[in-house]
Image (cartoon, rainbow, N blue to C red):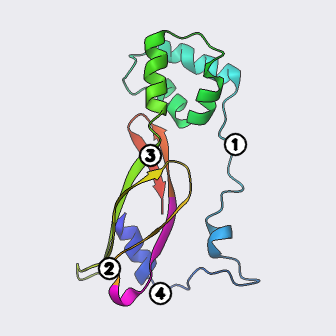
């Protein structure tokens, strides 16, 4: 992660800014307006629950990972399906894990730390703007991004 931030800071590329006619800026660069819909149908959920029932409950498997990936959709449709209480409890507990701790350091080519972002919890899926501390001559430095749960023990992050 630090490497990507380092490239973003030190690369000789024009900054992304809201300039009329040129695009860029947070509203267009970071926007996910054209993202695919991340919802499950009731039939898809039923199929995933049936497949997960044949797997070890707390082991990584494609059905469980898919149920977790589609967290909100899974929760919204879960009441219409009969699943064993222990599996329901496990799935609901996993889906209630809705935060990740984010920590970053900005390091230059000489290995000097030029800024840091102390560990802080951020909600999953929601876009965040986080300010680095101790940036010295860099001035104000803010990173924007989000974290999404994509499986049992896997997070995806874009900053």
- Image quadrant where residue 117 sits: bottom left
Could you tell me how far apart the alpha carbons at marks 4 and 3 are, in whole angstroms?
34 Å
Distance from the alpha carbon under mark 4 to that under mark 1: 36 Å
Where is mark 4, residue-wise? 12
Q: In this rendering, would 94 be left or right of 16?
A: left
Outermost residue on the bottom side: it is 137
Pick whichever of labels 4 and 1 is earlier in the sequence: 4
Check the picture and name the quadrant holding the N terminus. Answer: bottom left
Mark sitting earlier along the chain (3/2): 3
Point out the frontmost of discs 4 and 3.
Answer: 3
The label on residue 37 is 1
Q: Is residue 108 left or right of residue 13?
A: left
Q: Which residues are magenta?
A: 136-145
Q: Earlier in the sequence, mark 4 or mark 3?
A: 4
Q: Position of residue 85 (x, y in %)?
A: 47, 11
The residue lying at 41 percent from left, 76 percent from top is 7
Q: Secondary structure at mark 2?
A: loop
**Residue identifier under label 2:** 134
Q: Which mark is residue 99?
A: 3
Q: Which mark is residue 122?
A: none
Residue 70 seen: no
Q: Quadrant of residue 55?
A: top left
Which numbered disc, 2 or 1, marks the residue that appears first in the sequence? 1
At horizontal 37% and vertical 22% (from top left) the residue drawn is 58
Crowdedness near tag 4: few (<14), some (14–19) or many (≥20) residues, C-alpha within 10 Å: few
Marks 3, 1: nearer the viewer: 3
């Amino acid at each position: 992660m630090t490497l990507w931030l380092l490239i973003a800071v030190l690369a000789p590329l024009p900054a992304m800014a809201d300039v009329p006619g040129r695009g860029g800026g947070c509203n267009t660069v970071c926007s996910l307006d054209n993202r695919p819909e991340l919802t499950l149908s009731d039939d898809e959920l039923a199929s995933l629950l049936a497949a997960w029932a044949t797997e070890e409950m707390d082991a990584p498997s494609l059905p469980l990972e898919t149920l977790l990936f589609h967290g909100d959709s899974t929760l919204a449709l879960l009441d219409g399906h009969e699943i064993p209480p222990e599996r329901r409890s496990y799935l609901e507990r996993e889906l209630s894990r809705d935060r990740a701790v984010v920590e970053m350091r900005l390091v230059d080519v000489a290995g000097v730390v030029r800024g840091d972002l102390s560990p802080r919890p951020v909600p999953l899926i929601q876009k965040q703007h986080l300010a680095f501390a101790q940036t010295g001559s860099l001035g104000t430095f803010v990173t924007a991004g989000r974290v999404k749960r994509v499986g049992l023990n896997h997070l995806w992050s874009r900053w």
